[in-house]
Image: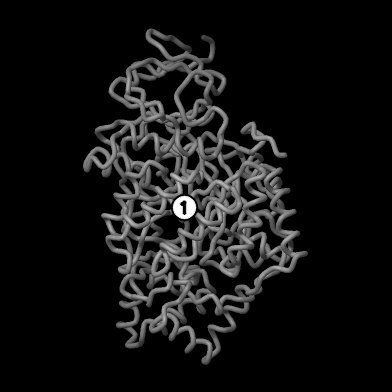
Amino acid sequence: MKGATVLKGATVVDGTGAGRYRADVRIADGLITEIGAGLGGASEVDADGLVLAPGFIDMHAHSDLALLLEPEHPAKVTQGVTCEVLGQDGLSYAPVDDTTLPALRRQLAGWNGDPADLDWDWRDVAGYLDRIDRTRVAVNACYLVPHGSLRMLAMGWDDRPPTPAELDRMRQVLARSLLQGAVGMSSGLSYTPGMYADTAELVELCTVVAAYGGFHAPHQRSYGQGALEGYAEMVEIARRSGCALHLTHATMNFGVNRGRVGEFLELVDQALADGVDLTLDSYPYLPGSTTLAALLPSWATEGGPAATLARLADPGARERIRYAMEEQGSDGCHGVVADWATIQISGVRSAELARAVGRTVAELAAERGTGGAEVFLDLLRRDELGTTILQHVGHEENVRAVMRHRAHTVGSDGLLVGARPHPRAWGTFPRYLGHYSRELGVLTLEEAIARMTGRPAARLGLDRRGRIAPGYHADLVLLDPGRIRDAATFEQPRLPAEGIEYVYVNGTAVVRQGRTTGARPGRALRRTDRGTLAP
């Protein structure tokens, strides 16, 4: 067939969880056109001994600006990722206006950087998705409407319920954003201003999401002291609104939750038994990652970044924050008292603070001869809230139990900025396949790949993606099952994975013989592209 590529003699793991089989697979015009034996094409790839899988789908990505700034996207294509879900944790850059965008840029600098030379030429979801397409990126991308950004548009950073008019505006902008192509809504309920929303507000908005066939992806109120209560609230919102629920970075962290994952999974199983449409994702590491400012108590962040920085300079407010962090338990720190030895600086905005990277707050405090809270407060003020951290609060038994669950999918939750970001940004998918599948046997290869491909594609409602079958889009990964592993470490977090030989996005190779090609065949996957009709 003219122009066709044939992957010869591959071991096909098709994304459904079914057993592997050997076949030739022909791709042409961006599609899988035939699966069989003895197939020929204009070019051939010797896939003997390699596993052919559908392209991996990252259900929780923070590449909202990285895709625009480095569209070849090596962090993800070298893992085999062919689609990402953006707009996570209730905060991103669409929909916005001329007031909220500058504040969001400042608030999210620790997640995404704040590039001065980027042309911020969009304001709504359609404009952002169009910008992805004009940029020509290496992977496909889906987008969630961020609840916190909606709330900023309607009512700023106020800690109160919305008025009826403000709630109506949120509903209207949400509906318009879904019509423009978003796949659902995210929420960030331990981040400003999403944390100020009550259950009733979220039910109202999720009812809109349900009407348009989307799903709710919450970063819930707590993953620590109130984790189980937080999960129960998310399930209750799903029940009351009829909205599908996807629990992002689902786990039970901090010392208070060691060994308690069974209680969480019982809650999940009961919801599924009751008919709740529920899935979840997790990353295969113990430490978490966020901004240092996220740990602040909610009252300290009311009013937005400028108001927060003013409080950090006020002695009385600083003492109130210290008390919340060290004695009471900050809601931003998931209701637990801060253990400064578990909070490690991974990136700073100001070059003057570079010495702090790689060190814990406790280590910095010991060096200065001060308390941990003083270091915490000074870093936030001097770095203008741009500091990122690792939190060493996970438990291996909890991580393994979640990844075994039948509702499980994979999300990296990877931040791509900072001197030493979490290695999950470069290593999540090969770590599942190498460490947890091949080495530990926690999942079979077929099960692990289904969690990365067919299952998330079904949650997103993707049109003909996530499986290897004729007529499906040729988003594909050829990998060496005996060699695949994550190379990224906490000391060297940007090392590409080993064992990923070829990656195709929409039929074009973005990785060939283990090296990136520079090709950029990805696009924004809008709801209209997925065949979902709005009422």
Disc 1 residue type (three-letter): Thr
The residue under the point 47% across, 39% down is 456
Residue 322 can be seen in this image: yes
Q: In which quarter of the image is residue 333?
A: bottom left
Residue at (46, 81) in percent of width and height? 377
Q: Given the current orientation, which residue lies at the most extreme front position?
A: 274
Number of residue marks: 1
x and y percentages locating residue 382 in the rendered image: 50, 78
Q: Name the residue under label 1.
A: 248
Q: Colour scheme of this structure image? A: one colour
The vertical placement of 136 against 174, above or below, is: above
Query: Percent position (x, y) of residue 241?
Result: 61, 52
Q: Is residue 512 visible?
A: no
* Quarter of the rendering containing residue 135: top right
Q: Which residue is drawn at 37% across and 76% down?
A: 338
To which quarter of the image does residue 289 belong? bottom left
For the view shown, which residue lies furthest in the bottom direction? 316
Residue 231 on image: x %, y %: 45, 58
Viewer-closest of 425 and 281 = 281
